[in-house]
Every structure is written in C-alpha cells, then in structure tokens.
Image (cartoon, rainbow, N blue to C red):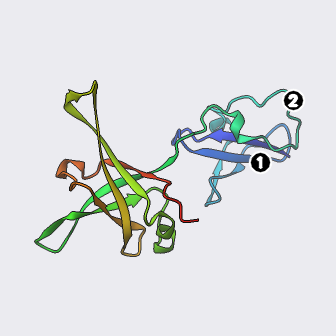
C-alpha cells in the first residue's frame, strides 16, 4: 500500500491523500479530500502536480506532509466580510457579519469568540513609508446557524470592505 500526498489540479491550494493498492497504481483509485466525500479519479489525472517522494521513504510508509513545499505557515484564519447587521431597511454599521473559512455551524464558531480580527487594506497616501492600513476588531458572538459571526471594529468598516477578506487571529486564547 503506497500513500501519497497530491495537489488537486482543479483547486491548487487543497491537498489530497491517495492510497494505491500496489506500486503500479491502478486506474480508478480512491482519493480522500480532508475526510469528506470520496472522489474517484484516474491516477494519470491526479498526479499532474505531485512532487516526488524522498528517496529514504519506502513503500508502505506514510509520508510527512511537512516535506512538501506547499504547506502554509500563516497564523490566522481567513474570513470574508458579508456586510453590516441590518433590518429590512435600516443598516446598523457598528456591527459587521463575517464568514470564517471552514466554519459551518454555531458550535464551530465558539472557538473564535473573542478573537481579534484585522481588516487589512491599501490606501493611496503613504504614512511612515507604508500604504498598508489595518482596522482592528473582535468577534463578539455567532449570527444564525450557518457559521457566520458578528464582529465589532474600532472604526466601522467602510462599504467597500463588503466581500473583502479579513484575518481572524488565533489570539487571545481561551484554552
């Protein structure tokens, strides 16, 4: 049994774990993507972007994913600004709605409550040699049942931030 870590050609940032019954790698192997639904694909299509395993690895051993060059070292979770909280006609600009990547339920949001949020953007004018600015905020509570959270920022987010990405820092820790 050979285990390989592959790149999905359609989604270059996702990693697939593949198991082949023997070294020849029969067509129609099963690929598992992050423990979710199984995808059936031919070996020739799946291994387009796969790096070669190290020479010291033997058949039947599990490869360490840290060997591969496409691992990430970021220390924040990605999120999207959905907009302000609002009624049918009135918008309340002091609270913003955020969708955090890979968070789908209210139970999943409990980890992120109290975490710091950074909206990073570029301005026209340089200050101290940098055009990069940040508006800081924090996650206050869940919103609905589908993993959306509410966040309050030090200054209200501008409407041009709707749909933009934010960074949810992994501090302060409540563990």
- Tally of numbered tags: 2
Residue 43, numbered label: none
Q: Position of residue 116 (x, y in %)?
A: 41, 56
Q: Position of residue 72 (x, y in %)?
A: 57, 39
Q: Which residue is mark 1?
A: 19
Q: Using the image as rendered, state which of residue 131 and residue 71 is in the foreground.
A: 131
Q: Which residue is mark 2?
A: 56
Q: Is residue 114 left or right of residue 26?
A: left
Point out the frontmost of discs 1 and 2: 2
Closer to the chain start, of discs 1 and 2, is 1
Q: Position of residue 143 (x, y in %)?
A: 35, 72
| Label 2 crowd (10 A; few <14 / some 14-19 / many >=20) | few
Instruction: Tell me the distance, in whole angstroms, between the alpha carbons under discs 1 and 2.
Output: 19 Å
Q: Using the image as rendered, state which of residue 117 and residue 62 is in the foreground.
A: 117
Indicate the secondary structure of the residue bearing disc 1.
Answer: strand
Q: Which residue corresponds to the image point at 69% horizontal and 30% vertical from the top-left? A: 51
| Label 1 crowd (10 A; few <14 / some 14-19 / many >=20) | some
């Amino acid at each position: 049994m050979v285990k390989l870590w592959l790149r999905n050609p359609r989604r270059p940032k996702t990693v697939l774990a593949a198991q082949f019954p023997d070294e020849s790698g029969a067509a129609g192997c099963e690929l598992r993507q992050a423990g979710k639904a199984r995808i059936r694909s031919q070996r020739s299509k799946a291994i387009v972007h796969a790096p070669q395993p190290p020479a010291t690895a033997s058949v039947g051993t599990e490869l360490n994913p840290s060997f591969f060059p496409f691992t990430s070292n970021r220390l924040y979770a990605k999120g999207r600004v959905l907009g302000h909280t609002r009624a049918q006609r009135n918008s309340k600009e002091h609270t913003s709605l955020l969708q955090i990547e890979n968070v789908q339920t209210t139970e999943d949001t409990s980890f992120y409550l109290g975490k710091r949020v950074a909206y990073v953007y570029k301005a026209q004018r340089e200050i101290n040699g940098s055009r990069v600015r940040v508006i800081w905020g924090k996650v206050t509570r869940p919103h609905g049942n589908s993993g959306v959270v509410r966040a309050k920022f030090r200054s209200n987010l501008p409407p041009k931030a709707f749909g933009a990405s934010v960074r949810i820092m992994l501090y302060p820790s409540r563990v």
